[in-house]
Each structure stands twice: as structure tokens, then as C-alpha cells.
Amino acid sequence: MAQVTLRRLVKEYEGGVQAVKGIDLEIADHEFVVLVGPSGCGKSTTLRMIAGLEDITGGEISIGGTVVNDIPPRDRDIAMVFQNYALYPHMTVFDNMAFGLTLRKFRKDEIQRRVMEAARILDITQLLDRKPKALSGGQRQRVAMGRAIVRDPKVFLFDEPLSNLDAKLRVQMRTEIKKVHQTVRTTTVYVTHDQVEAMTLADRVVVMNGGIIEQVGPPQELYHRPATRFVAGFIGSPAMNFIPARIEPASGALNLRLPGDILLPIPAERSDRYRAQGGREVLFGIRPEHLTETRQGRATYADLEVVPEVIEPMGMETLVHFHMDGTRDLCARLDPTIPAAPGQPLRLTADLANMHLLDPQSGRVL
Amino acid sequence: MASDATIAHAAPVIAPRATPPTTLQKMARRRSTIAFLLTLPLLAVIGGLVAWPAAYAIYLSTLNRRMTAFIGLENYAILLENDTFRMVIWQSCFFAITAVILKALIGFWLAHMLHHIPSKGQRVWRGMLLVPWVIPPALSTLGWWWMFEPSYSSINWLLAIFSVPPVPWLGEMWWARISVIIVNVWYGAPFFMIMYLAALKSVPDQLYEAADIDGATGWQRLRYVTLPMMRNIISITVLFSLIVTFANYDIVRVLTNGGPRDLTHVFASYAFQVGVLSGNIPRGAAVSLFMFPLLAVIAFFVLRGINERTKEIGA
């Protein structure tokens, strides 16, 4: 078990392209940290640098207090689960799991004990004699995890391990990974582009974009208090709505003027925070679940009328897509019993207690 | 609307009665028949250029010298009692096995070197290293003959610079055998190289990365990842090369012509000497067919192994 520290970590490829631009990150012992972000954001490169599979251009990586910049992967005491499993096709499941221990010259009975224990945890005991080709995607992923578990390493690294699985199996394996972590408590760094995976698995989520870290925090914090427009838009599905607006002072209070002359009163408890921004153009951010059917009786709710373009009944909820002047697709989340039809005006309520106001230039949340 | 549709569907439809296809038409439409017809040209080529000459050679080997009487396996029995032929068996096996092992090792080493140089430089080196395989062997062997020939030997001239006494490359039994092997390895190693290079490129990088993380050293990566992943291609190239090297003719013919004292003959050159130069076609056929059963058995087991591994690992 160990903590992982990244200090001013840089990865620059030939031609001067910087994939990782000097990031700092502290991962505590036993912690499950998920690096999440779109393709090309540098998350996999960061993971591979921690693994030692990529050279570091600048900065420092330490595992368990030891700087590992120049230590080869085999001596870093890490285990990695790859996106396409990377199981040795010519070895049985048992041999795949035992390989790392055999190379490290463990005694045969110890290898047997560890493999059987990992197989029991992952429920793959009956597969130990098979070759990877005879396994399903989910089974292969379990074997890949088993190969990591038997080593009892300081750190587990997962590189988009569920990307090759179908949606149903992905949900199942997500639970398995969480269970395994709760059992073995090994420090884990997990890379994914799927924010649902990140939110459900992580103790802390690291949102990366363009080679930098946008925000680090527990999933709920990222969801409720995003620091930037990127994080606000990336975390949550469907994504947060962004509407250009202006903060307007109005006899001691503040209003938000939205396109179409819609005027929303900023709740009194948030007014002080935005008072200095009076008259300023901002982005009004609100999640679809905070833009719902009309409800009465709460001071922080404000109504607005929209014309739905597309209705998506999801069973437990209905998504209503519409747009306002100067905006692209906006989305509201309605109770499925609410009648809504494309083209027919619909009255929605915005829960302004959960709104976000952002600086349109810097993208920072105000 | 819905009821209209129901009524329309319920109306009886009287289709014109089609004439049932004849047996010949049915047969022509069968997928197996079409497949057979499409492979017929290939079957004709294999039959005409492989099966028929092989069968005819087997038939010839059972005839007497004048090809007037059937003598069964007598040609083979006579050959086995012949000292020169026993030496040819030994020399052919020594030549083929040594040459194939050396070609495989050198080919693998070259492929490994090429695989680890940047792709731009790799193309140039790959092209240059393939040159021996592209030159017609009779022509390149002539060049080697010049280099080995005692009067003009450039190799001996180079050795002399380092004060090494001249080597009778083609005049002494073991040196002649070694010379024949050197030329065969020089000619054949690029084939192994290109096959192994393709195989190396097909090993997923992530297996090496997984092995690195599992704690493998460079040698262990080779031993536990590269070689097992290349087993099929190694098997098929060794088998193919073994068959071709056993049947090698031109290098021995040009370089030593079987000499000195018939000590460097292999099956093909000896078959030519017995069958064509000495005019005993049936015995020459028997010489050329001698290794066929053994090679067929080896080929059977190697190909079965490849098939099983392919099924098992999907490689």
C-alpha cells in the first residue's frame, strides 16, 4: 500500500506536443482516484507515466515516498489492468495470474494460494484451466483483475478497463471493481472517459482537459460545486445547460435576464455573492434535473415558458429538449406523468438554489 | 385504415405457378457445386504440376534401369546398400538441419534488430537485407564460388590480412560442406527475417507492457511472450525451409558439383547425377523420393500443431 504523488508532471512528445502540462496530484494510501476527461486530455498518458510505460519529460512521480522516475515498471511494485485485457493468449488463466509471481520467484504453494484466493474473490475458480480465447469479455476482465490482485502491489492502475464491454456488463463489472477495492483496499488510479464510471467508483475524481487538471474532488463536490465550465459540462448526464444571461440589479435584489426577456430573480441567499457583478454578462448554468415541471411554493423556484422540440421518454423520467435565442440544445428533466409534446408550449421551473453563474471568458464559476 | 389493410391482406393471392427446377439446375445452384467449379482451375494446376509428376516419379522409381520392368522397391533397397548414398543421406540431413537452424537463428536476430529501429531506417535495412533472397541463387552462388575459389579467393585474401592461412573452401570435405551451408544460409536467412519481422509486428505491444509490469526482464519477455506468440510462424517457416533445403539443388551443383569425392552431394544433386548424368532415371527418381515419407510425417505433425494452437489461442 502506498501513496502516489505527482509533482509538476510533464509529458512532451516529439514535435513539442505537450500531452501533460505540469500537473500536481496527491493520491492517499488506500484511495480510489479516477482520472476522467475526453480523448486526448492526457489521462492515459499520466497513468502510463505512473506505470513507467512512458518516459517523463519533466517533474516527478513518487510511489510510497520513493521517486520512481528512473525505475523500470517491473520494480515499481504496481499492477495494471489494460483496456483490452492484455492476457497472454498462450497461457491458461492460472498461468496468466501466476506469471508475475513466477517471475518474482514465489514458492509454488504461495503462488497456488494467492491465485486461488484471487480466483475466489473474482468468482473465476472454474475458469483457471481455460485459455483466454475461451472466455467472454467479462471473464477476461476478471482474469486481468485477478492478475493484478495476486501480486498484492502497492498501487493498482486501471486503463479504461470497461471500455470493451457492453453496457450491461459494464455496470456489473463496475460493481465488481468497487467490491474488490473495498476488499483489498489497495491504492487505485483508474482512467476512464465515462463520467458515470468516475462518479460511481471514485473516492476522488480528477477531471482533466487539454493536459491540465481542471478540478479534483469527491464526486458530489464536482457535481454540485464545479469550478469551471468544463467540469460543469462534463460531469452529469445529460450535461448542464448553459444560457447566456445578464445580472441586473433591481431595487436591492438581483435578477438574471435570459434571452427572450425572461427575468429570473436570483435567490436572496446568493445575491450577496453576485452583488459586485451587477450588469455583467454571465453564463447561467443549470442542470436538467433542476429544470423541471412547474412546482409551486418555494422561493428559489422561478418559472419560464419554453417550446419543446424533442421529447425523450426514458421511463422513470422524460427529457425535454428545447432552445432559446443564442443557445444550442437545452434539456429539462420532467416527471414522466407530465404531458409534453413537441411544439406545444410548456411551463418549466428552474431551481435557482442549484444554479451556477460562470464567467463566459475564463469559464470559471463565479 | 387498419381494417382496409386487414381486408387487403386477407384477399387470396394467386401467384403464377413457376416451373420446378430440374435436377441439373438444382445441382448448379448448390453452393458446394459453385465452390467446386471455382476451385477447378486450381485443382487442375495442382493436379497437372504436382500430383501427376509426383505420381509419375513414384511409378518411375519402381521400374528397372531400362524402364521395361516393374521391380517394386528394389531401387530403394539397392540405394540403401550403397555407401555413397548413405553418405548422401547423412550429408543431406546435416546440410538441411544445420542450415535451417542457422537461417532461423540469424533470421530471428535480424528481424529483432530491424523491429527495434525506427520505421524510416527500417525500410532501407529491410530492402538491403532482402537482396540475397531476390538474386537468382545460381547467379549468387557463382559469386560465392569466385570468393571461395583458391586462385582468386577474396575471402582468403581478407584472411591473409589478419595472417590467417588460406582455407581450402571447396577442396576439403568439411570446408566444402561448411561452404555449401554458408551460401544456403546467406541466401535463405532473409526469408526467415521477413517472416519473423511480420510475426514480431503482430505481437500486441500491450503484452510486452503487461510483461514489463509483471516483472519480466528483456530475456523473459522474449522467452515468455515473443517466442510463444511466434510459435506458429516459427513452425511453418522451419517446416517450409526444411522441405526446400532438403530439395536444394542449385547451390551444391554450382558450388561443389557434389565434390570433393561426392562428399557434398544432397538428395537433389545426387538424384540428378544418378538419374540424368548416369542415365538411371528410375534410381534417380528413387533418390529424389527418399525423404518424402519422413518429410510428409514431419509436415503432418507440424501442421496439426499449428492448427491446434490456432484454435486454442486464436493466433
Image: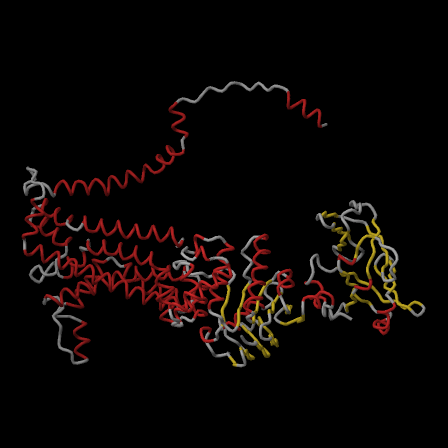
Q: Is residue A322 visible?
A: yes
Which quarter of the rendered picture does the C terminus of chain B lie within?
Answer: bottom left
* Foreground pick, A311 / B60: A311
Residue B162, compared with residue A364, is above or below; it is below
Q: Position of residue B227 (x, y in %)?
A: 34, 63
Residue A14, can we see it?
Answer: no
Q: Residue at x 60, y 56 (%)?
A: A171
Q: Classify residue B246 as left or right of residue A78.
A: left
Figure check: A225 above or below A124: below
Q: Residue furthest right?
A: A251
Q: Is residue B141 left or right of residue A257?
A: left
Comparing A256 with B160, the one in front is: A256
Place of residue B242 in the rendered image (x, y in percent of width and height, measured from the top left): 23, 56
Residue at 72% in and 70% down: A227
Q: How is the image coloured?
A: secondary structure
Where residue A229 appears, as percent x and y from the top left, is 72, 66
Number of marks: 0
A182 lies above or below B232: below
Point out the image quarter for the N terminus of chain B: top right
Which residue lies at the image location 12% right of the left edge and 51% below the top edge?
B272
Q: Is residue B195 left or right of residue A32?
A: left
In percent of width and height, residue B263 lies at: 9, 61
